[in-house]
Amino acid sequence: SQKIEQNSEALNIQEGKTATLTCNYTNYSPAYLQWYRQDPGRGPVFLLLIRENEKEKRKERLKVTFDTTLKQSLFHITASQPADSATYLCAPQLRSGSARQLTFGSGTQLTVLP
Amino acid sequence: GAGVSQTPSNKVTEKGKYVELRCDPISGHTALYWYRQSLGQGPEFLIYFQGTGAADDSGLPNDRFFAVRPEGSVSTLKIQRTERGDSAVYLCASSSGTGGYEQFFGPGTRLTVL
């Protein structure tokens, strides 16, 4: 069955460092991979989408990579700030069929320490 | 403009009762999704609408769950004979397209079944 694993449930880093979050998937060939941020008591907020033919995507301090051979996506936050503290969710998405919905990993809770 | 809204924000009910949860998507978004999120987990897909019709309801756990979107805008998720295991946050999302489009989430409805 399809499975999504995100590294460690919780990740603590020092302010100013780069946070790297991992998303591994099995039994999947996603055409897209989306990353969302979720704060306590709120719905997820879209951050970045990367397509299967893209190796890397950047947006301000965020960078996402997508390795379809390793079946892995890495999500980087550079120059991290305490305001980046949140849960980050990855969501591989198939191109067609009954996969318009997103299938989420369980998330990685990031804490950036001042 | 206005984002996705959900009402009520909190709902407490007794086992066996019927509940309705409402979602107002972003105006013009044809795709609407319902997810359920338990503590410490990522959102879990329930049902997806394209316009007025349910394009994929494969995530509904059993026949106690039903959702409608009669005019292609507002959607209602209905749960009959609620059970304690139905307690979770129910999230609604909408998007202007399907594959490869970001989803905009509402704040969720926290359902507690006593």
Image: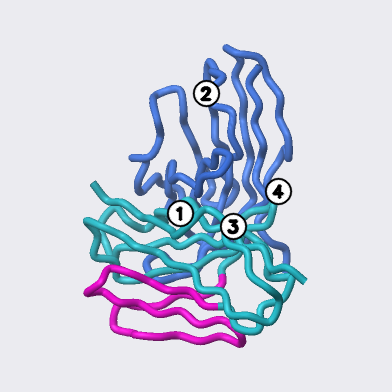
Chain colours: A cyan, B blue
Disc 4 residue type (three-letter)? Gly
Disc 1 residue type (three-letter)? Gly
Asked whether the residues under marks 1 and 4 belong to the same chain, the reply is: no
Look at the image and say whether residue B20 sits in the magenta stretch. Answer: no
Residue A93: give x, y in percent of width and height: 35, 63
- A37 up-or-down from A5: above or below: below
Instruction: Check disc 1 and report its element: helix, strand or loop.
Output: loop
Subunit ID for the residue under disc 1: B
Subunit ID for the residue under disc 2: B
Residue that badge 3 annotates? A109
| Marks 4/3: CA–CA distance | 14 Å
- B21 up-or-down from A34: above or below: above
Are the residues at dot 2 and dot 4 in contact (C-beta closer than 8 Å)? no
Disc ID at residue A41: 4
Residue placed most toward the observer, A25 or B18: A25
Tell me what residue is drawn at x 58 percent, y 46 percent: B91
Disc 3 residue type (three-letter)? Gln
Residue that badge 2 annotates? B85
Disc ID at residue B51: 1
Instruction: Check disc 2 and report its element: helix, strand or loop.
Output: helix
Write down the quadrant of residue A91 in the picture: bottom left
Look at the image and say whether residue A69 sits in the magenta stretch. Answer: yes
Tell me what residue is drawn at x 59 percent, y 19 percent: B18
Quarter of the picture holding the C terminus of chain A: bottom right
Are the residues at dot 1 and dot 3 in contact (C-beta closer than 8 Å)? no
Instruction: Check disc 4 and report its element: helix, strand or loop.
Output: loop
Q: Nearer the viewer, mark 1 or mark 4?
A: 4
- A58 up-or-down from B5: above or below: below
Residue A75: give x, y in percent of width and height: 48, 74
Region of the chain picked out in magenta, as a range: A47-76
Subunit ID for the residue under disc 4: A
